[in-house]
Image (spheres, helix red, strand yellow):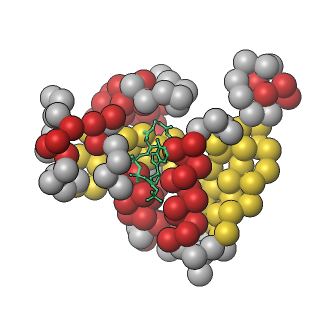
Amino acid sequence: MLQDESSYEKTSFQFKRPTAEDGYAVNQLIEASPPLDPNSVYCNILQSSHFAETSVCAKTGENLSGFISGYLIPTRPDTLFIWQVAVAEPARGNGLAIRMLHELLDRPACKDVRFVETTITPSNTASKKLFQKLANNLKTKIEVSDAFTKEKHFNGLHDTEQLYRIGPII
Ligand SMILES: CC(C)(COP(=O)(O)OP(=O)(O)OC[C@H]1O[C@@H](n2cnc3c(N)ncnc32)[C@H](O)[C@@H]1OP(=O)(O)O)[C@@H](O)C(=O)NCCC(=O)NCCS
């Protein structure tokens, strides 16, 4: 069920760990959130189950208003990698994305996290602002470098993804 934009102003979001049953709704949200790459439903079910401790759903009643998939990098468990962030269009501009990031960092699973990493394409201003805000809130810095490049990794078919490494988080 969709809500109109004005009803979000007074809405409080409920945060929860996703379950496999959220996978389909997550898939629909990601698909409706360009420039994110759409995933298979199966991928979103795995994110919502295997990575539930480091992923978050934001619900407004029964509606999925936001989602973040993340995981601790297996060889560097002090680093939370944020895979995708999506906020449903009518819910944007209410601080939901930044609140979801802090919700993840407050989890027991993230108690030893000292760095947050993500990749961003240079044209995604909203994403850059979001992670700049996270670094500001955490009173730490961001290092930017090329992660996966257009020619070397994407065969020229996708813009270069730049690595944003935020930390150390004290
Ligand atoms: C990017 C996205 C997740 C932001 O969600 P949101 O809940 O509206 O973001 P927030 O309200 O928490 O905003 C966080 C910061 O980013 C800024 N920001 C958010 N959207 C912005 C936009 N479109 N342009 C410029 N700045 C933007 C906010 O102003 C805020 O910074 P400030 O408090 O210093 O002003 C949402 O627009 C979205 O889902 N976009 C499509 C998918 C996508 O690009 N995901 C990004 C991958 S990380």
| Residue under the image location 52 percent in, 63 percent down | 134
Indicate the quadrant containing the C terminus: top left, top right, bottom left or bottom right.
Answer: bottom right
> Quadrant of residue 136 in the image?
bottom right
Looking at the image, can residue 57 be seen?
Answer: no
Image position, residue 164 (x, y; %): 68, 53
- In the picture provided, is 142 more to the left or to the right than 86? right
Image position, residue 110 (x, y; %): 50, 67
Image position, residue 6 (x, y; %): 17, 42
Q: Residue furthest right?
A: 152
Q: Nearer the viewer, residue 37 or 129?
A: 129
- In the picture provided, is 47 more to the left or to the right than 149? left
Q: Nearer the viewer, residue 142 or 77?
A: 142
> Quadrant of residue 167 in the image?
bottom right
- In the picture provided, is 23 more to the left or to the right than 70? left
- In the picture provided, is 148 more to the left or to the right than 25? right
| Residue under the image location 33 percent in, 34 percent down | 89
| Residue under the image location 74 percent in, 33 percent down | 160
Q: Nearer the viewer, residue 95 or 44?
A: 95
| Residue under the image location 69 percent in, 59 percent down | 165
Q: Nearer the viewer, residue 66 or 133?
A: 133
Indicate the quadrant containing the N terminus: top left, top right, bottom left or bottom right.
Answer: top left
How many discs appear? Answer: 0
